[in-house]
């Protein structure tokens, strides 16, 4: 009979043998990083053909793991991950400042988003560019969802829910994560530096909700530097005044749709603003913001004496004395400042429109303005729609500029309203003589712009053209690079003859930009005169009288372009192998509202017509109509933002 098996533990208990103490569990070996053995240290085992190694491999897996004694325990230094390899793409070698400048000029958001997905570095750079500006406007209630989609990414969850309770619209976020802090502001709000608010007029019923979105967004923009707005509420004014980094402000105080102006109580918080670099107040009607009774505009100016670089004021003659009692205000703030010759020590650009310099009672604007502004140090001056006292003002400027030493005048850009409001051109020239003398008192201009010069009311037969006096004034500035004659409307515009154009192109060798209305009966002579302007890059002819306006089958813009280019091809000179770029610098031509690009080898572009070829004999050049066929409707709910573009560009 087979004996029954008994366990060793039971046998030891019967024999009285004490049990052994439990052995401690073996220490788990520290996991070391796998190292690929080098080729010379690796021993290759010869395995005969057909011999299986599965059992040995399985035994190795099930058996007790062995630790290589030659491999020491890894130290903390070994656990440090190796440094990331530096990117070797073409953009990574550029400094961050240059790369950001390049990205800011890329006008294709889909490509920018693709670039942001490639690395964390590019993500940070691209997001800062994409969210740099908020640009909204709405003139129809159906566009409110588009505006909401642009603004909501900068709001917290709590703000979105609150606005949704105030009014439900398409475009609002439907669901919210429960894992996120409802009071947390999205990081993209910190990237916003500029905000442009255009006309907000979706209707009386819907306008309040759009303004509420704007109010809430302004609360979340701590780094805002530029604000350009056509709308202002008390909450918006308080948030704007609290922005410590604000450098530029533009406000349009009059709503042309509702004929309403910003109330005084609404704009009062703006008195706290200071240290601005750019200020633009547009108030075509009477506004309490401009008048001295409330001191809103004057307080901002007094708080920005040493920082203000550009000042643009558009007001009516009834509220134009925005510097009333200026000397007493300066003396009350800082008596030592009265020793200075001028108050705005950093001002480089001044634009005045609609003001009058002499009041019927008491001192007018001129006395305070000449004290506050150093006109000799200005780089840019714009004057338009001036009222009472403008001849006295130009007389003062003429004496100031003519008596100064050479090299003291810094004025480079001048824009003047030349509408004399006279019955004929002879009477207009008498009124304009004071302006002519001022322009002739110096010779430092690089850009000169005339508005509504010599408009006439007697029809095309009595076209006055450009007088000899204004031609003499223009050619005195031989370093002129930009000359523009601009008009409101398309009728009663003086035409420039070929003889006049020849005088201008011959005496202005650096001319790069030219705008005028051509006398089309002299097109051959005009193109001959233009061929002498070898540095001309941009030609603008927004006003012309060619063709029958009732015949819509004629493309009058392209017809004018074709005449101009054919004439330039013919007058390019004798060359064996003609190339447009070797003969001319001209790259842009504007005809009416159309823009064309000129070049020898233009490629087709997306959403544009194919380039056209213009030939004259054996010579030819290509022209690209830059009018896009994109059916995008973004311009319906996007503000222009031209002023923001101007001040963000480097000044002279």
Image: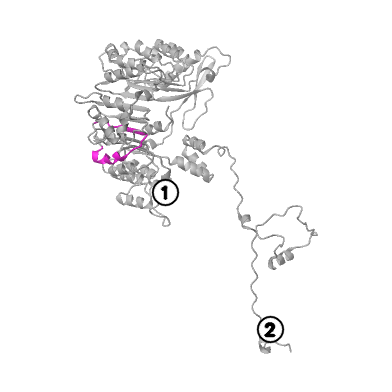
What residue is shown at x 41% (from left), y 35% (from top)? 631
Q: Which mark is residue 344?
A: none
Quarter of the picture containing the C terminus is top left
> Percent position (x, y) of residue 223?
40, 43
Q: Could you say whether the residue bearing mark 2 is in a helix, strand or loop?
A: helix
Residues packed near mark 2 inside 10 Å, few (<14), some (14 to 19) or many (20 plus): few
> Label 2 to label 1, Cα distance in Å?
71 Å
**Depth check, front residue: 37 or 224:** 224
Q: Residue furthest left?
A: 361
Q: Is residue 55 magenta?
A: no
- The answer to whether the residue labelled 2 contacts the one labelled 1, judged by CB atoms less than 8 Å apart, is no
Q: Which residues are magenta?
A: 262-285
Residue 33 in sight? yes
Label 2 belongs to which residue? 8
Residues packed near mark 1 inside 10 Å, few (<14), some (14 to 19) or many (20 plus): some
Quarter of the picture containing the N terminus is bottom right
> Percent position (x, y) of residue 234?
28, 43
Q: Could you say whether the residue bearing mark 1 is in a helix, strand or loop?
A: loop
Label 1 belongs to which residue? 186
Q: Is residue 265 magenta?
A: yes
**Depth check, front residue: 421 or 240:** 240
Query: Which quarter of the figure has residue 194?
Result: top left
Residue 58 vertical placement versus 419 (above, below):
below
Q: How many marks?
A: 2
Residue 256 in sight? no
Q: Left of 285 or right of it: where is 613?
A: right
> Percent position (x, y) of residue 573?
53, 12
Lower sequence index among marks 2 and 1: 2
Task: Tell me how the rendering is colored.
Answer: one colour
């Amino acid at each position: 009979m087979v004996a029954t098996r008994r366990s060793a533990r039971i046998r030891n208990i019967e024999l009285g043998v004490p049990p052994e103490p439990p052995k401690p569990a073996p220490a788990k070996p520290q996991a070391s990083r796998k190292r690929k053995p080098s080729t010379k240290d690796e021993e290759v085992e010869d395995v005969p053909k057909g011999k299986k190694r599965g059992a040995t491999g399985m035994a190795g897996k099930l058996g007790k793991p062995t630790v290589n004694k030659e491999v020491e325990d890894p130290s903390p230094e070994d656990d440090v991950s190796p440094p990331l390899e530096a990117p070797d793409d073409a953009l990574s070698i550029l400094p961050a400042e240059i790369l950001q400048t390049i990205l800011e000029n890329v006008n294709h958001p889909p490509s920018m988003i693709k670039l942001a997905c490639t690395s964390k570095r590019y993500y940070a750079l691209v997001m800062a560019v994409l969210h740099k500006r908020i640009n909204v406007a709405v003139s129809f209630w159906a566009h409110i969802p588009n505006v909401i989609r642009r603004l909501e990414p900068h709001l917290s969850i709590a703000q979105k829910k609150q606005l949704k309770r105030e009014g439900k619209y398409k475009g609002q976020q439907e669901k919210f994560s429960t894992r996120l802090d409802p009071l947390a502001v999205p990081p993209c709000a910190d990237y916003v530096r500029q905000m442009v608010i255009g006309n907000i007029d979706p209707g009386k019923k819907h306008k309040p909700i759009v303004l509420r979105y704007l109010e809430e967004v302004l609360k979340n923009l701590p780094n805002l530097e530029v604000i350009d707005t056509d709308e202002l509420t008390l909450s918006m004014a308080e948030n704007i005044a609290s922005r410590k980094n604000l450098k530029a402000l533009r406000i349009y105080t009059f709503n042309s749709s509702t004929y309403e102006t910003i109330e005084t109580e609404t704009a009062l918080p703006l008195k706290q603003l200071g240290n601005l670099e750019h200020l633009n107040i547009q108030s075509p009607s009477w506004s309490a913001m401009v008048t001295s009774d409330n001191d809103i505009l004057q307080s901002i100016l007094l708080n920005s004496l040493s920082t203000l670089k550009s000042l643009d004021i558009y007001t009516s003659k009834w509220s134009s004395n925005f510097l009333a009692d200026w000397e007493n205000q300066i003396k009350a703030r800082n008596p030592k400042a009265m020793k200075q010759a001028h108050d705005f020590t950093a001002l480089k650009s001044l634009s005045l429109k609609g003001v009058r310099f002499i009041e019927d009672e008491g001192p007018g604007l001129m006395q305070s303005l000449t004290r506050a502004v150093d006109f000799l140090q200005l780089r840019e001056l714009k004057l338009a729609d001036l009222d009472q006292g403008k001849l006295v003002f130009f007389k003062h400027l003429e004496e100031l500029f003519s008596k100064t030493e050479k090299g003291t005048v810094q004025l480079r850009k001048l824009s003047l309203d030349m509408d004399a409001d006279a019955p004929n051109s002879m009477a207009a020239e008498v009124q304009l003589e004071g302006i002519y003398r001022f322009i002739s008192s110096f010779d430092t201009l690089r850009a000169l712009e005339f508005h509504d010069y010599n408009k006439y009311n007697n029809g095309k037969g009595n076209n006055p053209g450009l007088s000899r006096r204004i031609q003499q004034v223009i050619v005195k500035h031989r370093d002129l690079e930009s000359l523009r004659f601009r008009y409101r409307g398309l009728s009663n515009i003086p035409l420039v003859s070929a003889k006049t154009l020849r005088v201008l192109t011959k005496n202005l060798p650096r001319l790069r930009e030219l705008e005028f209305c051509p006398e089309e009966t002299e097109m051959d002579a005009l193109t001959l005169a233009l061929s002498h302007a070898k540095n001309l890059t941009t030609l603008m002819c927004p006003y012309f009288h060619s063709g029958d306006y009732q015949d819509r089958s004629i493309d009058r813009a392209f017809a004018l372009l074709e005449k101009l280019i054919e004439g330039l091809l013919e007058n390019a000179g004798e060359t064996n192998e003609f190339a447009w770029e070797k003969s001319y610098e001209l790259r842009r031509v504007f005809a009416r509202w159309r823009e064309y690009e000129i070049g020898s080898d233009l490629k087709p572009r997306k959403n544009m017509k194919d380039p056209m070829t213009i030939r004259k004999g054996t010579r030819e050049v290509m022209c690209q109509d830059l009018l896009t066929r994109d059916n995008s409707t973004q311009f319906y709910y996007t503000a222009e933002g031209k002023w923001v573009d101007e001040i963000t560009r480097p000044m002279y």
